[in-house]
Structures are given as structure tokens and as C-alpha cells.
């Protein structure tokens, strides 16, 4: 076999050779597909490391029982996720992230989903505070992602000052 015939398998043929060009293009596609599949298997090994572990807690030192309602602002009619904290109680959760990592925040801590973007915190059915997800540098907003997000350990404490700063409800807080 001459060297020219071997090279013709891998080098482009002249434009006028339609069948030969089609055959070579099919070979290139098949070779490219095999390389992609090999790379896919290479990336799916067992030794990819481990996901991160997050330790999050919320504590109620406000002097009032707290009800936290997590909801999506674009679906206000959907029943919110509700978390209750009795006076001087602490709720702790440990989250083991998988691979690829998804991160963790108080949004997920309170609702189990990163889709919820708003909170209503009700203090003893007397006052309430409303928070929305964002980067507004508010230390007292549990879902401010510039302050309380993706650290491996987060502790949030509701204080009596939080109760005093919350809005008074006209009648029962809902």
C-alpha cells in the first residue's frame, strides 16, 4: 500500500470527489464521536472528591414564638413552607452537598428549595418582618445572599431587637 493511499484516508480530497468527501466526513464524525465518548468516560470516575458539608442553625432569642413563612414572590397564592421556633429554641440542620456542588443557604434551610425567594417572620402574632432575597447588605435578612449564603457554617439568631424593629400588625398577623 502506497503512502498516498493511506494519507488520502485522513486528508481532504479535492472538491470534485463527492463520494470520497462524504466517506471522509463520515470517518471524521465517527472519530470525533469516539473521542467525545472517551472524554465522557474519563470524567465519570469514582475519585471525583466529596461534596461539602454545611452546618446551619437558627435560634429564637426574641422573647416571642416565631413563625417563618417561606414563599415565592411570583406565586403568592401557593401555600408557603412554614417553620416554627419556640422561645429560646434552636433549629439545626446539616446538609451534605453532592457533586457537582449546589451550595446551601438559609433559603434552602427554611424551605428545602432554592426557588423560594421571600420570608415573612411573625413574632408572637404581634409583629412581622418581610424579607426578600437579594444583595442589600441587611445583616438581619436571613436570605441576603451577600451576607448569609454558602458559608459552611452559619448561625442566625432572632433577637428582641428584631421584634422591636418589626412592623406592628393591625390585628392578628397572617
Image (tube, helix red, strand yellow):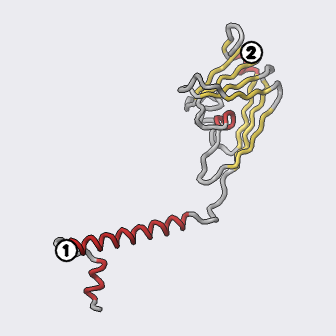
- Decide if residue 161 is on the left or right side of residue 20: right
Q: In the image as oriented, which residue stretches furthest toward the right?
A: 88
Report whether residue 10 is seen: yes
**Looking at this rendering, what residue extends furthest in the left direction?**
16
Q: Can residue 140 be seen in this snapshot?
A: no
Q: Which of the 4 image quarters holds residue 99?
A: bottom right
Figure check: 104 above or below 81: below
Q: Residue 61 placed where, x, y %?
A: 79, 26
The residue pinned by badge 1 equals: 17
Quadrant of res 112: top right
The answer to which of marks 2 and 1 sits earlier in the sequence is 1
Q: Position of residue 169 (x, y in %)?
A: 68, 11
Q: Secondary structure at mark 2?
A: loop
Judged left or right of residue 170, residue 64 is right
Tag 2 residue: 125
Give the numbered dot on residue 45: none
Image spot of residue 114 (x, y percent): 60, 37
Residue at the image point whose x is 54% and y is 67% from the top: 42
Q: Secondary structure at mark 1?
A: loop
Q: Residue at x 42, y 67 (%)?
A: 33
Amino acid at each position: 500500500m502506497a503512502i498516498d493511499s493511506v494519507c488520502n484516508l485522513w486528508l481532504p480530497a479535492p472538491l470534485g470527489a463527492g463520494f470520497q468527501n462524504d466517506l471522509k466526513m463520515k470517518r471524521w464524525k465517527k472519530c470525533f464521536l469516539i473521542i467525545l465518548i472517551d472524554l465522557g468516560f474519563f470524567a465519570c470516575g469514582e475519585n471525583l472528591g466529596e461534596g461539602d458539608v454545611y452546618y446551619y442553625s437558627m435560634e429564637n432569642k426574641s422573647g416571642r414564638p416565631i413563625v417563618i413563612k417561606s414563599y415565592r414572590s411570583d406565586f403568592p397564592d401557593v401555600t408557603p413552607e412554614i417553620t416554627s421556633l419556640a422561645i429560646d429554641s434552636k433549629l439545626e440542620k446539616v446538609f451534605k452537598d453532592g457533586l457537582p456542588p449546589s451550595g446551601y443557604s438559609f433559603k434552602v434551610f427554611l424551605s428545602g428549595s432554592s426557588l423560594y425567594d421571600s420570608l415573612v417572620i411573625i413574632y408572637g402574632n404581634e409583629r412581622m418582618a418581610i424579607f426578600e432575597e437579594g444583595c442589600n447588605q441587611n445583616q438581619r435578612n436571613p436570605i441576603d445572599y451577600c451576607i448569609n449564603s454558602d458559608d459552611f457554617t452559619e448561625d442566625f439568631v432572632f433577637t428582641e431587637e428584631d421584634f422591636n424593629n418589626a412592623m406592628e400588625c393591625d390585628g392578628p398577623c397572617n
